[in-house]
Image (cartoon, grey):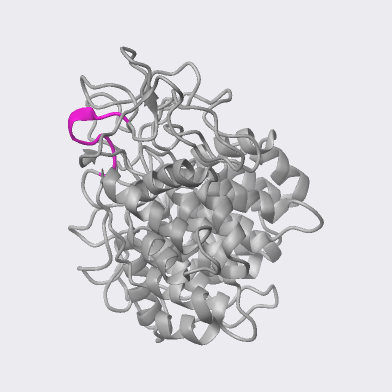
Amino acid sequence: MAYPYQSSGFPGYPGYPGNDPSYPPAGQQAFPGGQYPPGGAYPPAAGGGYPAAGGFPAPGGYPGAMPAYPGAPGFGAPGQAPGYGAPPGAPGYGAPQCAPGYGGPGFGAPGGYGAPAAGGYGAPAAGGFGAPPGGAPSYGGYQQPGAQNYGGGGPAPVPGGFPSGPAPGQQPLVSAQHQPFAAAMTATQGTIKASSNFDALADAEKLRKAMKGFGTDEQAIIDVVSNRSNDQRQKIKAAFKTAYGKDLIKDLKSELSGHVEELIIALFMPPTYYDAWSLYNAMKGAGTKEGVLIEILCSRTNSEVRNIVACYKSEFGRDIEKDVRSDTSGHFERLLVSMCQGNRDESQNVNVQQAEQDAQRLYQAGEGKLGTDESSFNLVLASRSFPQLKAVADAYARISKRDLISAIGREFSGHIEDGLKAILQCAINRPAYFAERLYKAMKGAGTKDSTLIRVVVTRSEIDLVQIKQAFVQMYQKSLASMIAGDTSGDYRKMLLAITGQ
């Protein structure tokens, strides 16, 4: 790495690419570059749409359908029923597949990252996620006969949070035929958006002034960093080096310390690099941070996983699959190796007949027999699309009268249980999964600061607005209040600024 290990516990950080201050290279799509709705596109939630602590929404709740916000009309494709992520006239929003502007094969200078050669890693796929063809209603919701009840009319969850099927007199909205299905990640919203009047050189000057002379103006650094998108931060780094011939990351590390240093440096890492870096540090040295492996590998899209694998190889000179095999074992190892392939079905169609068959297969592999056929669970949860897995969970509840997540808890233990549950939770309600990660990082004595930092940073431009809303519904307290109670000083100020408080 370009810089030495620091006493703060944050490993050395890579430098800048070549001498090209432009980022991203010409022809690459900027991040987020219109992938998110304009500010105020979603009304604030006053409750509803999320379950009580520990549970997950009833069929048709968030994220399968956006009308989870009380009093707000559903967003839908023009002329269609509510329940999908794109506002009228828009093509549909979604989390970007990966951060743009990365250069293959080496992300810039050796050991570094930043603005590399053309042809780098992925600009987001055009169009994003949003309304499926025909504006079909969200699967999992149930419709009263003759009523326009999309997404939110399902029965209350059974214990454990999963649906048990239509209430008497109600009909499933999806037939046994292949039907359009709302994306597992529908319209989402980050708390950080690109600054509209962005001037990379002016921001570089502000940061230089904040660090020049005796003492550091931490508030000035917070004001700049927390109000710029990741793509804009990459341009600030390049402008800083162009203007002053100095490395911004190195200067920040010399002026900051502790958790606020870790947080700000994480914000300056390109997203794919940050995921790869987090995985590398979770496996290097003695011990393995299995929770980090599960969080990243089980929640990312196919293109994100593939870019992480490529970045891991180019930046750290290692094969992530080999590292996973050497640091894990048994069924947990096999699940993570499956995740490393980035080969999950990402079709937005649901085959209800197959969902019923998969649910029966899982029942026979677990509750329906003595012992557990772990390979059947791995096959279904590692390969089926997230919308399909939600349908499998619905079908399983009807077959066994027990929700699938509880069944996994009865049949598995340890890290394999955590991994399988994470996949299923992301399929049913991704923001709720990350809300739970944040809550567990702060509850009880002590704070798991690296988890808190990683989740806040990685979701800040994707779905942190929805995560905050899920947090309130699940734990009856705001994310900001819990952060304020568990952190202090500039670290607290920076976290609250990122979360939009």
User: Which of the 4 quarters of the picture holds residue 475?
Assistant: top right
* Residue lying at the far top of the rendered structure: 146
Give yes or no for residue 134 being in the magenta stretch.
yes
Q: Where is residue 351 shown, x and y percent of the image?
A: 26, 46
Front-lying residue, 464 or 103: 464
The magenta segment: 128-137
Q: Where is residue 169 shown, x and y percent of the image?
A: 40, 19
Question: Does any portion of residue 265 appear in the rendered image?
Answer: no
Q: Is residue 390 left or right of residue 486?
A: left
Residue 374 against residue 354 in the figure, above or below: below
Front-lying residue, 361 or 379: 361
Q: Where is residue 197 shown, x and y percent of the image?
A: 38, 39
Residue at (28, 54) in percent of width and height: 346
Residue at (37, 19) in percent of width and height: 149
Quarter of the image for the C terminus: give it: top right
Front-lying residue, 288 or 316: 288
User: Which of the 4 quarters of the picture holds residue 145?
Assistant: top left
Q: Is residue 75 left or right of residue 91?
A: right
Q: How many marks?
A: 0
Residue 475 against residue 154 in the figure, above or below: below
Residue 41 against residue 369 in the figure, above or below: above
Question: Does any portion of residue 375 appear in the rendered image?
Answer: yes
* Residue lying at the far front of the rendered structure: 369
Q: Main secondary structure of the magenta part?
A: loop
Front-lying residue, 144 or 476: 144
Residue at (32, 64) in percent of width and height: 21
Give yes or no for residue 4 being in the magenta stretch.
no
Q: Where is residue 18 shown, x and y percent of the image?
A: 32, 76
